[in-house]
């Protein structure tokens, strides 16, 4: 039998149950467990264009400086791959939502043809919700000792997590700078 025809996962799962059989009443085993009922979908993915040599030749700024130089405050934290979760005005951002989105970022990073084709330092997560998620922020502060700053009205940076994370509260944004996003609300 060729090695690529062996069903290693089935064998491992059987062996794991045998190893834990003396305490089998303490465990439930689920093989090939589906994580969700529908396919995993990121609300919005923003991929930043690569700065080319021609772009840097026109400007005195380096490619690195140009990448950081984004006009809108909303995009200042962005890197190459930016995962955005949006909650409608009728919804709220829960602790479970946070973990789901961080999981999406991890899955997005890992589902590539080559190892580290997307480097973790190239990822950011943006959470957009209509009101400040106090329970989530309390949880992150006490669980991960995060630091929250508010560099711009309506934009909060959450430091100390796996990826850079920003929280955006549309109603707190500058109505002049964000004519449309700041008005995205009920009634």
Image: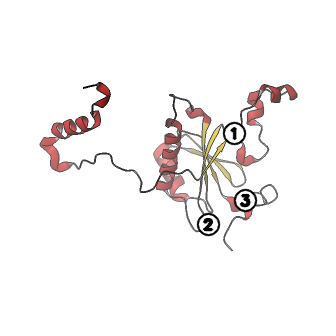
The residue carrying mark 3 is: 181
Quadrant of image for the C terminus: bottom right
For residue 56, what is the image quadrant?
Answer: top right
Up the image or down, 68 lies above or below 179; here it is above
- Is mark 1 in CB contact (under 8 Å) with mark 3? no
Q: Earlier in the sequence, mark 3 or mark 2?
A: 2
Residue 177, percent from left and from top:
80, 55
Q: Is residue 147 left or right of residue 172?
A: left
Q: CA distance from mark 2 to mark 1?
A: 27 Å
Residue at the image position 29 percent from the left and 31 percent from the top:
5
The residue carrying mark 1 is: 48
Characterize the local packing of mark 2: few (<14), some (14-19) or many (20 or more) Cα atoms within 10 angstroms: some
Quadrant of image for the N terminus: top left
Q: CA distance from mark 1 to mark 3?
A: 20 Å
Residue 169, percent from left and from top:
66, 58
Residue at the image position 48 percent from the left and 48 percent from the top:
142
Q: Which mark is residue 89?
A: 2
């Amino acid at each position: 039998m060729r090695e690529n025809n062996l069903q290693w996962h089935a064998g491992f799962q059987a062996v794991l149950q045998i190893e834990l059989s003396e305490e089998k009443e303490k465990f439930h085993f689920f093989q090939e467990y589906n994580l969700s009922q529908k396919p995993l979908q990121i609300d919005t993915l923003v991929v930043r264009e690569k700065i080319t040599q021609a772009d840097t030749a026109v400007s005195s700024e380096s490619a690195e400086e140009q990448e950081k130089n984004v006009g809108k405050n909303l995009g200042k934290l962005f890197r190459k791959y930016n995962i955005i979760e949006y909650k409608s005005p009728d919804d709220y951002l829960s602790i479970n939502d946070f973990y789901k989105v961080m999981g999406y970022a991890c899955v997005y990073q890992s589902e590539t043809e080559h190892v580290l084709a997307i480097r973790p330092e190239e990822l950011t997560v943006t959470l957009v919700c209509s009101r400040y998620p106090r329970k989530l922020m309390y949880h992150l502060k006490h669980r991960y000792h995060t630091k929250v700053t508010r560099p711009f009205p309506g934009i909060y940076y959450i430091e100390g997590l796996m990826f850079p994370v920003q929280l955006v509260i549309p109603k707190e944004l500058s109505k002049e700078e964000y004519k449309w996003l700041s008005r995205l609300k009920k009634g």
